[in-house]
Image: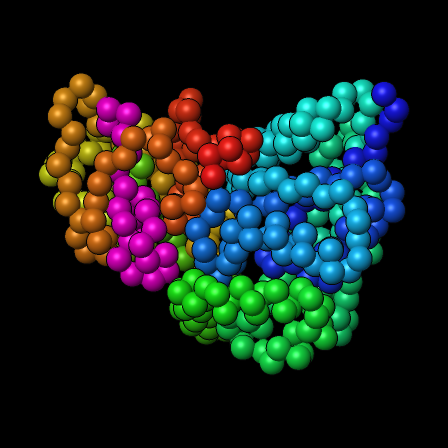
């Protein structure tokens, strides 16, 4: 078989705008087909992740068709791994191999080119795949800054920027298809706007503290990862942010150690009827999770504690209380990131290894 050039574009496209279109236009000039790996797939709707991966795939297809492109474009989902870059890179390679097999292309017959904007730290992945070629495309700018989807989302959900201005900055087709989506998803829009307003208020209060002290101050939290009989103890959040999502029991430190905070929050939110001293003895691991993007509110650090309760006995009884609408046990192998708050899915992955999570991008694309 003759050589086939495959361009690979990795991005979140939350949402797709004319700066992204520039990548696709370049890819169509240098390759026979384009594979798009859509990041942050299978995450619940939020200020940062407003659109499902399938919706973003539609945005891409519609915008490129409207531009007159006839390029062969395939979209596949890609799942975030905040604390495991190697797994993320492995998912990228797996998705590429899946696409080649689906297209009947032998790996030896494929020239693979990663196409992206080498604009900042978020583009560092372009250097993680030495076996592929890389093609850097100059980023689109507006008023001296790189065009970005964060500002586009703010214009739709937070600032309510006039549509005419959004069209001018981010592209007419790209803007209009988001407007159409918003018209047909009023409940989702209301949810996203409420989350965005909450996060903005949080960030404004945070900046007051930074101004007062003269340096950045993280919010310190603690979370409990409680496992028993192949199940994990979760709560359903009663309040913003993340109302209705599943989360680990936890909360902010209150002049106490992280360990004491984790146990206090665990008891308060789940009414787990185990003495504190016994819980201390069931701690099997602890780890700090401080990825700067783990929370959409701002800089929020947490230390998570893994509690291993005794297997083989009846599941401990729990009941939601305090900030938790309900508390419940869930089989660990049924967890998926689309129902989990912030990075709690990633925390569980890190502290409960060797569990068959529904995690692979390939599996997830077949499940949904």
Figure quadrant of residue 358: top left
Q: Is residue 266 left or right of residue 338?
A: left
> Considering depth in this image, is 48 or 209 the residue closer to the camera?
48
Tell me residue 5's x, y (percent): 83, 34
Residue 333 in sight: yes
Q: Residue at x 20, y 49 (%)?
A: 326
Q: Is residue 242 left or right of residue 3?
A: left
Is 247 covered by the magenta stretch?
yes
Please count the marks in the image: 0
> Considering depth in this image, is 29 or 231 the residue closer to the camera?
29
Q: Quadrant of the N terminus?
A: top right
Q: Is residue 150 above or below residue 121?
A: below
Q: Residue at x 50, y 69 (%)?
A: 183
> Considering depth in this image, is 298 or 359 the residue closer to the camera?
359
> Considering depth in this image, is 39 or 239 the residue closer to the camera?
39
Tell me residue 10's x, y (percent): 68, 44
Residue 210 in sight: no
Q: Is residue 209 left or right of residue 235?
A: right
Q: How is the image coloured?
A: rainbow
Tell me residue 241's x, y (percent): 37, 60
Span of residues in magenta: 228-251
Q: Residue at x 19, y 23 (%)?
A: 310
Tell me residue 269's x, y (percent): 20, 49
Q: Residue at x 83, y 50 (%)?
A: 26
Is 295 covered by the magenta stretch?
no
Figure quadrant of residue 140: bottom right
């Amino acid at each position: 078989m003759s050589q086939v050039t495959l361009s690979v574009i990795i991005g979140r496209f939350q949402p797709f705008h004319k700066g992204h279109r520039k990548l696709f236009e370049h890819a169509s000039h240098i390759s026979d087909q384009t594979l798009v790996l859509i990041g942050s797939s299978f995450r619940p709707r939020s200020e940062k992740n407003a659109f499902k991966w399938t919706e973003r795939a539609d945005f891409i297809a519609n915008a490129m068709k409207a531009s007159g492109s006839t390029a062969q474009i395939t979209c596949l989902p890609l799942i975030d791994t905040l604390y495991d870059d190697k797994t993320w890179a492995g998912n990228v390679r797996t998705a590429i191999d899946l696409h080649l097999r689906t297209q009947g292309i032998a790996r030896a017959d494929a020239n693979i080119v990663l196409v992206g904007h080498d604009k900042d730290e978020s583009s560092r992945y372009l250097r993680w795949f030495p076996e592929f070629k890389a093609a850097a495309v100059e980023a689109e700018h507006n008023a001296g800054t790189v065009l970005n989807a964060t500002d586009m989302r703010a214009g739709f959900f937070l600032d309510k920027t006039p549509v005419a201005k959004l069209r001018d900055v981010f592209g007419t087709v790209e803007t209009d298809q988001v407007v159409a989506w918003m018209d047909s998803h009023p409940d989702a829009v209301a949810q996203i706007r409420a989350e965005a307003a909450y996060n903005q208020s949080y960030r404004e209060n945070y900046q007051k503290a930074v101004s007062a002290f003269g340096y950045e101050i993280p919010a310190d939290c603690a979370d409990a990862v409680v496992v028993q009989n192949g199940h994990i103890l979760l709560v359903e959040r009663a309040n913003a942010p993340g109302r209705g999502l599943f989360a680990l029991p936890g909360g902010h430190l209150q002049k106490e150690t992280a360990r004491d905070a984790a146990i206090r929050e665990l008891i308060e939110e789940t009414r787990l009827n185990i003495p504190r001293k016994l819980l201390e003895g069931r701690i099997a691991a602890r780890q700090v999770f401080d990825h700067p993007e783990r929370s959409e509110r701002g800089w929020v650090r947490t230390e998570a504690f893994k509690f291993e309760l005794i297997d083989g006995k009846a599941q401990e009884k729990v009941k939601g209380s305090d900030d938790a609408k309900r508390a419940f046990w869930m089989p660990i192998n049924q967890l998926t990131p689309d129902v989990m708050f912030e990075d709690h899915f990633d925390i569980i992955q890190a502290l409960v290894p060797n569990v068959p999570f529904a995690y692979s991008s390939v599996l997830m694309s077949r499940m949904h």
